[in-house]
Image (tube, rainbow, N blue to C red):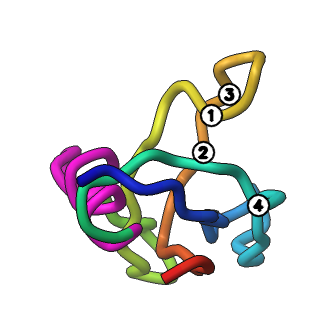
Amino acid sequence: MEKIVMISLLYLTFTGEIKTTPWFEVVSKSSCATWYYWNVKTLPKKQRPLSKRNYYVYKGYGTNGETLDIVGYRCSGH
């Protein structure tokens, strides 16, 4: 059974700060962790040269299809 959950993505800025996106709804069969795995973690992992922080390049966020360097997520609506 599919359900609607709220998720907020954690992303790196150009300066290396971690920021969060506004909450948005996703439809998932089990949880937002499943959505995150299939939509973000399946992408190739990259690494910042100086900080050595790992991230995933997620294309298509928001109505303008923005590209974000994702490092994690927050979930609501379990």
Query: Pointer 4: what residue?
Result: 23
Q: Nearer the viewer, mark 3 or mark 4?
A: 4
Instruction: Write down the region rendered in magenta.
Output: 32-45
Residue that lies at the very extreme toward the front in this rendered image: 1
Above or below residue 69? Residue 32 is below
Q: How far apart are marks 3 and 4 (CA)?
A: 15 Å
Q: Which of marks 2 and 1 is in front?
A: 1
33 in the magenta segment: yes
Q: Which of marks 2 and 4 is in front?
A: 4
Q: Which of marks 1 and 3 is in front?
A: 1
Callout 3–callout 2 Cβ contact below 8 Å: yes
Does label 2 or label 1 sit earlier along the sequence? 1
Q: Residue at x 34, y 65 (%)?
A: 47
Residue 66: x and y in percent read 68, 28
Residue 15: x and y in percent read 78, 66
Does label 3 or label 4 sit earlier along the sequence? 4
Query: Pointer 3: what residue?
Result: 66
Q: In which quarter of the image is residue 53?
A: bottom left
Q: How far apart are marks 4 and 1 (CA)?
A: 12 Å
